[in-house]
Image (cartoon, helix red, strand yellow):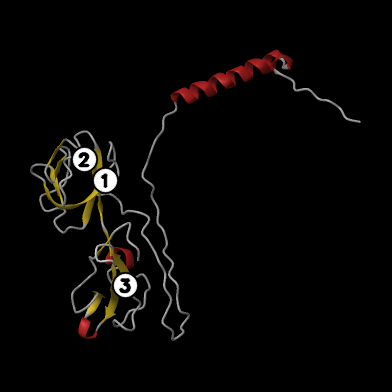
Amino acid sequence: MQRAYTARGLRFLPKLAFYITAGVITAAISYQAMATDVFTDPVGFITLTVQGSNGLSTAGAKSFQGLGMTQLPTNRGTIASVATNGITDTSATWANNDYTNGLFFIEITSGGNAGLIDDVTAASGDTKTVYTASNDSGQIAAGQTYKIYPHWTLGTVFGPNGEAGLKKGSSSTADQILVFNPLAQTFTTYFFSSGGASGTGWRSSGTIDRQNTKLFLDQVL
């Protein structure tokens, strides 16, 4: 035999319970009216795991990796004016000698072209202006916000002294990092040299220090 049940509405609640329920509903509505969205930068780290050959004398194993997070921004603010290859923020705190090594980039974070990025080539503390590799004046405007980040490099990702745990050695014995160059459609090979004719440090060929080689967020390693 089946039994039918009916739901009890508010009219069946005791008067005191009804008042309490109504108060909770009113409080919830008021809370929603006052609530605002707050956005903060994500903070944390990711681990890139590479395949090993388990000590076998084979050609080795390959892993395809990408960098999914930026480094912490060094500056952020609101654009006051834009000129050819120049972005001015009158509240900026950078100095004249900042950003001259080409290892920083700017991201536009608001407006119609939010997400636009460009390399920063220099900065002026006197005029509060950073200079970009390209002329972005037609795509950005005063009032938009920005952030400036350091580029990832071989040294910051894998350690300036190879601290990440990759095998050191010569060009034929060390673990290799292959970085894809989309313009040339080829891979450039890097490794950590432990000495010898190449010296000690990050190398591609010869004795040139490659630890400041930039690794872009959309590159394949």
> How far, Cα to Cα, is label 1 from label 3?
32 Å
Q: How far across and how far down the image is residue 30, in percent?
A: 49, 21
Q: Which residue is mark 2?
A: 139
Vertical relation: 144 (above or below) 6: below
Q: How far across and how far down the image is residue 214, in percent?
A: 25, 62
Specify which label sits upstream in the sequence, 2 or 3: 2
- Do the CB atoms of the residues marked 1 and 2 lie less than 8 Å apart? yes
Q: Identify the residue at image location x=46%, y=23%.
A: 33
Vertical relation: 202 (above or below) 170: above
Write down the quadrant of residue 111 in the picture. Answer: top left
Secondary element at image label 3:
loop
Q: How far across and how far down the image is residue 158, in percent?
A: 33, 67
Vertical relation: 204 (above or below) 180: below
The kind of residue on which mark 2 rests is: Gln
Specify which label sits upstream in the sequence, 1 or 3: 1
**Nearer the observer, 184 or 131:** 184
Whether residue 34 sits left or right of residue 94 in the image: it is right
Q: How far across and how far down the image is residue 11, in percent?
A: 71, 14
Q: Which residue is mark 3?
A: 162
